Image (cartoon, rainbow, N blue to C red):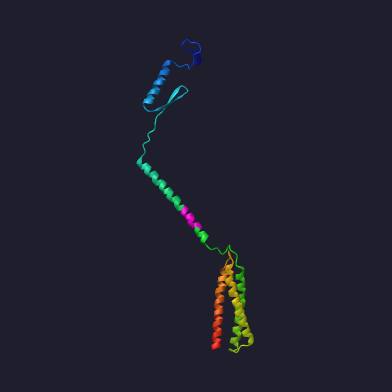
Amino acid sequence: MAGIRQTNNRPGRYRISTGKSAGSARSSRSSRTAADERGGLHFGVKGRTVKKTRKNTTIDPAAAQEREETRKALEARRKRKEQNIREQKEAAANRVSYVRKPISRRSLYSLGFLVVAAALGVYGIYGGVTTNGQAALSSAAFGFCSILFDISSLWYGIISFLEEEKNHMIARITVILSGLMLAGWIITIIMGIRG
């Protein structure tokens, strides 16, 4: 039984007795010494000796190579994923979206002038054809007004490109059609003068 007892018959010197015999203490010390000689480690836990030997740290070359290949494959996969994300972002930035951008206001004016010019031009030409080239003065007036509206349509179509962050698809169409109509009127006038 554990207790405190006086040692060497000297007053003031005491030691804690765990109730173990001297033989068990010597065997415990000898086992720790033997473990130290074998290169092991020991820990005292409640009067018992727990032995912990060093593990064998030899690395298998095949396993190490397999781990290295796995690491390289994962790294390559991560880089491919990052590259795909970067390419998708660049493609989205370069893609033109006509749905999100509002239509240019001047391009609508250009479209309106173009429709009026086409209507007046058709009516003026129809008057000249039905009279076999002997059109009345009103047909010439309709043709002249058609030319003026066509020039206005071309002008508004061109200046509509100055509006930023707008949809210019209608402006492109009206500029092309207005240019063709104006060229047709110029050719018609030249042929009438020479004719």
Query: Which of the 4 quarters of the picture holds residue 159?
Result: bottom right
Q: Is residue 145 visible?
A: yes
Is 128 located above or below residue 39 in the figure? below
Magenta-colored stretch includes residue 14? no
Asked where in the image residue 128 lies, by quadrant, the reply is: bottom right
The residue at 56%/73% (across/down) is: 175
Looking at the magenta stretch, what is its main secondary structure? helix
- Left or right of residue 133, residue 16 in this image: left
> Is there any visible trace of residue 114 in the rendered image?
no
Q: Is residue 5 left or right of residue 39?
A: right
Above or below, 94 against 71 in this view is below
Is 86 magenta? The answer is yes
What residue lies at 54% left-to-right and 77% top-to-bottom?
A: 180
Q: Nearer the viewer, residue 143 or 160?
A: 160
In the displayed structure, would residue 166 be above or below residue 125?
Answer: above
Q: Position of residue 103 (x, y in %)?
A: 60, 67
Q: Is 88 rendered above or below residue 160?
A: above
In the image, residue 141 lies at what x, y percent?
Answer: 63, 84
* Image: magenta residue range: 82-89
